[in-house]
Image (cartoon, rainbow, N blue to C red):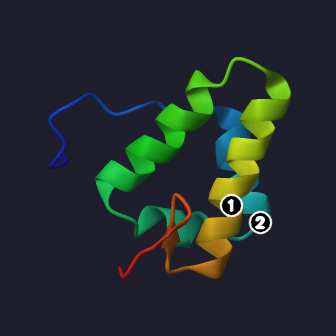
Amino acid sequence: MTGLKRALNPMPDDVRAALTERGVMVAYEVRPDYQKNDYLGRIGRAKRPDTRQKRLDQMLDELRRGGVYMNMAWRG
């Protein structure tokens, strides 16, 4: 059960693998549902593979650093 009013975006296998490989799955899991949904939606909407990779890399970097969400300061 989530607090979201819209449907959850599915997590693609390659995103799950990247989160695991980079060791940031726990950081991802503790983020609020809206953030997880926003990250996955933004990655999924990319039309070009290089754009998709750039968005995935941004998410992974923000999770690794903590305190950042979509290039904005965030206190979790």
- Classify mark 1: helix, strand or loop: helix
In the rendered image, the residue lying farthest to the front is 72
**Which residue in the structure is indicated by mark 1?**
60
Do callouts 2 and 1 mark residues in contact (Cβ within 8 Å)? yes
Q: Alpha-carbon distance for marks 2 and 1?
A: 8 Å
Name the amino acid type tagged 1.
Answer: Leu
Most extreme residue toward the right is: 50
Please tell me whether residue 64 is drawn above or below residue 44 in the rendered image.
below
Residue 10 shows which numbered tag? none
Residue at the image point whose x is 64% and y is 79% from the top: 65
Which residue does the image show at 67% across and 43% down from the upper left? 15
- Left or right of residue 63, residue 74 in this image: left
64 relative to 71 in the view: left or right? right
Q: Which residue is mark 2?
A: 22
Image location of residue 4, percent across then percent down = 19, 42
- Residue at image x 79%, y 39%? 53
